[in-house]
Image (spheres, helix red, strand yellow):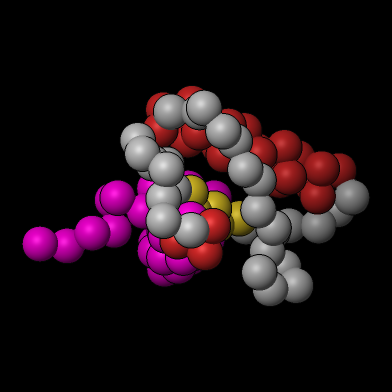
Amino acid sequence: LGGDEFAVLMPNTDTTECESLCRLFSERIAEGMADASFQISTSIGFATFKQAPVSISEIFQKAEEAMHVAQTSGEKFSVRNWSETVTS
């Protein structure tokens, strides 16, 4: 994780709930920064698994892939799930 990145682990959280919480994080971060007169954008990537992943690094890798897609979306506040980034 880089200096402007953080991770939140949410065991037993499904994709819908995780996305909802990530959107809430984004909104609250933006509100707090606006109150301090800072205009920012947020890019959040998340990964959910039906079965336990092989390693914790796999979780971070998938979430980071999704975050990079969020960053390139052009949206001011973007949340992406890694499964949306998989191409066939």
Residue 39 vs residue 7, the one in the foreground = 7
| Residue farthest along the right direction in this orientation | 36
**Left or right of residue 52: residue 57:** right
Residue 31 vs residue 83, the one in the foreground = 83
Q: Quadrant location of residue 43?
A: bottom right
Locate residue 37, reporting x and y percent.
86, 53
- Does the rendering let one see residue 20? no
| Residue farthest along the bottom direction in this orientation | 2
Residue 80 vs residue 18, the one in the foreground = 18
Residue at 52% x, 64% y is 57
The C terminus sits in image quarter: bottom left
Residue at 66% x, 69% y is 1
Start and end of the magenta stretch?
59-88
**Left or right of residue 70: residue 87:** left
Q: How many marks?
A: 0
| Residue farthest along the front direction in this orientation | 54
Residue at 50% x, 28% y is 13
Locate residue 29, reporting x and y percent.
73, 45
Locate residue 47, reporting x and y percent.
44, 48
- Does the rendering let one see residue 61? yes
Residue at 52% x, 27% y is 12
Q: Is residue 65 magenta?
A: yes
